[in-house]
Amino acid sequence: MIGLYAEAKPPGFGFSDTAFRIFILMASRRLSCDRFFTSDFRPEVYTEVGMAWVRNSSMRSVLLRHHPILTPALRSVANPFAPWRSAAASREDRSP
């Protein structure tokens, strides 16, 4: 974790370029090794309803399903992996 603070973040990024490259490399490896995304990603394991649930979900829908309080912060964000609105700005939207 300490190393994440050693390198400056590019404008608009949440973490450094090196951390981003490592994240991308490891994310693809984790997905390619996860049987639930490879050999077991089929209706016999997930059911048709489960397959539809996975196909029709997005990062935004998963975040909001589990944390609906994030709705104001994600309202004007096209990509939930991009920087969100500040918490203070989101709270102002909720005030009467």
Image: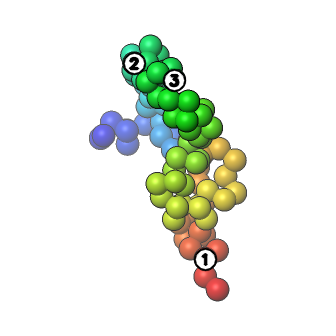
**Which residue in the structure is indicated by mark 3?**
43
Is residue 22 placed above or below 15 in the rendered structure? above
Label 2, secondary structure: give it: loop
Q: Nearer the viewer, residue 4 or 36?
A: 36
Residue drawn at (67%, 52%), measured in percent from left and top?
77
- Type of amino acid at the residue the image marks with label 2: Arg
Q: Give the labeled residue for mark 1.
A: 94
Q: Which residue is most to the left?
A: 2
C-alpha span from label 2 to label 3: 14 Å
How would you rate the neighbour count of disc 3 (Cα within 10 Å): few for under 14, some for 14-19, many for 20 or more?
A: few
Q: Choose the circle earlier in sequence order: 1 or 3.
A: 3
Specify the quadrant that holds the N terminus. Answer: top left
For marks 1 and 2, the one nearer the N-term is 2
> Between residues 42 and 81, which one lies in front from this camera angle?
42
Tell me the kind of residue under disc 3: Pro
Report if residue 66 is visible in the image.
Answer: yes
Distance (Cα) linking label 1 and label 3: 42 Å
Q: Secondary structure at mark 3?
A: helix
The residue at the point 47 percent across, 40 percent down is 15
Of all residues shown, which one is farthest toward the top? 39
The structure residue drawn at horizontal position 55% and vertical position 35%, both measured from the top left corner, is: 49
Of labels 1 and 3, the one closer to you: 3
x, y (%) of residue 86?
56, 63
Q: Which residue is mark 2?
A: 35
Q: Which of label 2 and label 3 is nearer to you? A: 3
Residue 3: numbered disc: none
